Image (cartoon, helix red, strand yellow):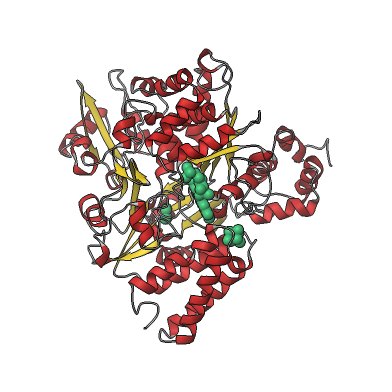
Amino acid sequence: MLHKTISNLIKEESVKIIRNGSWGAYWLEPFIEIEKDGVRTGASYRNIDLTHLKTIEDFFLDFEKKNPFDINEIDFIKNQNRIVFSRIGQQDPLDINYYRATKGYESLITALEIGHQETIDRIKSSGLTGRGGAAFPTGIKMQTVFDQDVSTKYLACNADEGDGGTFSDRLIMESDPFSLIEGMTIAAYAVGASKGYIYLRSEYPLAKDFLSDAIDIALKNNYLGENIQNTDFNFEIELRIGAGSYVCGEETAMMESIEGRRGLVRSKPPLPAINGLFGKPTLINNVVTLATIPALLSDQHSEFSEIGSNKSVGTMPFQLSGNIKNGGLIETRFDITLKEMIENYGSGTKSDKPLHAIQIGGPLGIYLSSNMLNTSLTIESLEELKGSVGHGGIIVFDDSVDMSEQAKFAMEFCVKESCGKCTPCRIGSVRGVEIIERLQKNKASKEDAILLEDLCETLESTSLCAMGGMTPNPIHSIINYFPNELIEK
Amino acid sequence: MSSGQSNTFEPLTLIEPFIEKKGGLMPALHALQEHLGYISKESIAELATAFNYSQAEIIDVITFYDDFRTKPIGKNIIRICLAEACQSQNCKKLLKDISSQLNLTLDETNHDSGITLKEVFCLGNCAIGPSVMINETVIGEATTEKIINHLEEDDA
Ligand SMILES: Cc1cc2nc3c(=O)[nH]c(=O)nc-3n(C[C@H](O)[C@H](O)[C@H](O)COP(=O)(O)O)c2cc1C
Ligand code: SF4
Ligand code: FES
């Protein structure tokens, strides 16, 4: 809207309008920046209507009155360590010249020079773990696919981003799509795949447009297609659109969907890396995991790998949302505390009411209470609390939240999204909703408390995938960290 | 198939590009629905023949996915996000308000206004919820007023 209004005002050639992507600083956006004589400043145009302006000069005057500033200088951006998200917000996301000018595609060239095994070794030594949820070491998965002595192999990029409170994949696809495409191309080369799929959720129509355009541009510039950069490496990418199913983000359900069937989870083994899409070895990675790969083959490798320890190596793009003043994308080391995240980056609750609960890691993640703010956001520290970092979503609730409703939602979501293969997940979740509804009427019911506990145990021990297996996580956390809010002890 | 007549809809021409594709059923379903707004009975029969599935198998796939429908719906689709970040921003109240304003419940179509109301779980707009998508436009910090205004602008 604003883009159109301002475009209409521009009459002279000396003014050029660029639609840059989001900075991931949502509370400021739409954020309009003006670059003049090499100096760039901007101002927030949140909920502002400009249709009354007549000329571009009117706009410049209005802009000056807003005390424009350099967005790179605000704490929210300055304190981050943006490696994977270094380009977002800076320029037109489809400007391949800008991408190249900022070291884009240098890493692909490097990979093609150093060869398959050396590329995989560098990714292994970086310590990168999957950002889709399960935190599996990326290099090891690549090695397994590479080691299969089969001529046809596939790459599948998981862009189903179904967790409530997450948007890092969306930001990459809409604000720096070439980083994903380059990452996919490097990964495909490394493991020996010549065809890649992006399984994109249907709720992201804008990402679909950006990806389609970026794929076309990469093709025209010989970064995709046949004999890429004059080598004998061929690689093509096909975009596949999901159809509103959360469980299709689970990798084997995603493969079923790509193959044209219901999204039923397959049992593992066989691992997709050995027997995946259309029966062939398949490398499956999340959008952010793949978009991280170019940095690992550049001089940023050591910068990335020297951050953090154990599984929590490198930067993590956390996504801060919900009842929060300054929500958005925060790429930082893992070992920052929840307190720093919410107070320093987020500036507290949006409602100014007391903080009450924070859910970390999506619908299958745990709720932490306001007295747990010293928790560090590493994979290990959340595992200790029987939770997970997952895809990095952090959702803030103030004290108006009813935790029994949040517990009920965990079961309701499982009812809606279960693929239906396992009885406890399909039927047990329905019973779970009923038990929680009874507890909402009588928190002191010992009988229902025990039933809920038994049901959770059954879900954990008999589910084929984490949908059923981890649905108890938020519920346990509410029982343990929010005494008397669901169950009276 | 009723070929030759004007205004007839031929599923096969839409499906054709996907038949030879590996796993072409999903894109074929999307193409059909984009064209007609839903997957018709006639299309199901064509899909079954083209992809060598039984009709029951095609229906199985269609019913698994929330997006696919076998009946026409409204010209404008409002999807209201009911996932956790939007819950913290009172999406349930927004749902109530918009339902009473538009005289619609979830999954219902008002044939006079041509509006269908649906739920969705996350639009990737979680930092400025509650979020709503009207057709393909995402609206943050959504209010009933913003939604109505947007619908009116679209109509204008
Ligand atoms: C119910 C369920 C939903 C999932 N949804 C997603 C998703 O939307 N995106 C994603 O990347 N991974 C998702 N995963 C994890 C994938 O199964 C898989 O671990 C991941 O795509 C691997 O990529 P990575 O190693 O790069 O993280 C989901 C898992 C489960 C059990
Ligand atoms: S746990 Fe649930 S979603 Fe996972 S395979 Fe079993 S039924 Fe399907
Ligand atoms: S949770 Fe509503 S947009 Fe993400």
Instruction: Look at the picture and state if A479 lies above or below B59.
Output: below
Residue A387 shows in this picture: yes
Instruction: Please tell me which residue lies in front, B90 or B36.
Output: B90
Instruction: Please tell me which residue lies in front, A274 or A353.
Output: A274
- Asked if residue A436 lies left or right of residue A5, the reply is right
- Asked if residue A406 lies left or right of residue A346, the reply is right
- Asked if residue A362 lies left or right of residue A421, the reply is left
Residue at the image point whose x is 56% and y is 47% from the top: A251
Q: Horizontal and vertical percent for residue A31?
A: 28, 39
Instruction: Look at the picture and state if A470 lies above or below A76.
Output: below
Q: Horizontal and vertical percent for residue A442?
A: 43, 86
Instruction: Look at the picture and state if A11 lies above or below A381.
Output: above
* Quarter of the picture holding the C terminus of chain A: bottom left
* Quarter of the picture holding the N terminus of chain A: top left
Instruction: Look at the picture and state if A205 lies above or below B57.
Output: above
Residue at the image point whose x is 58% and y is 46% from the top: A242
Residue at the image point whose x is 72% and y is 55% from the top: B60
Q: Horizontal and vertical percent for residue A270?
A: 63, 47
Residue at the image point whose x is 52% and y is 76% from the top: A454
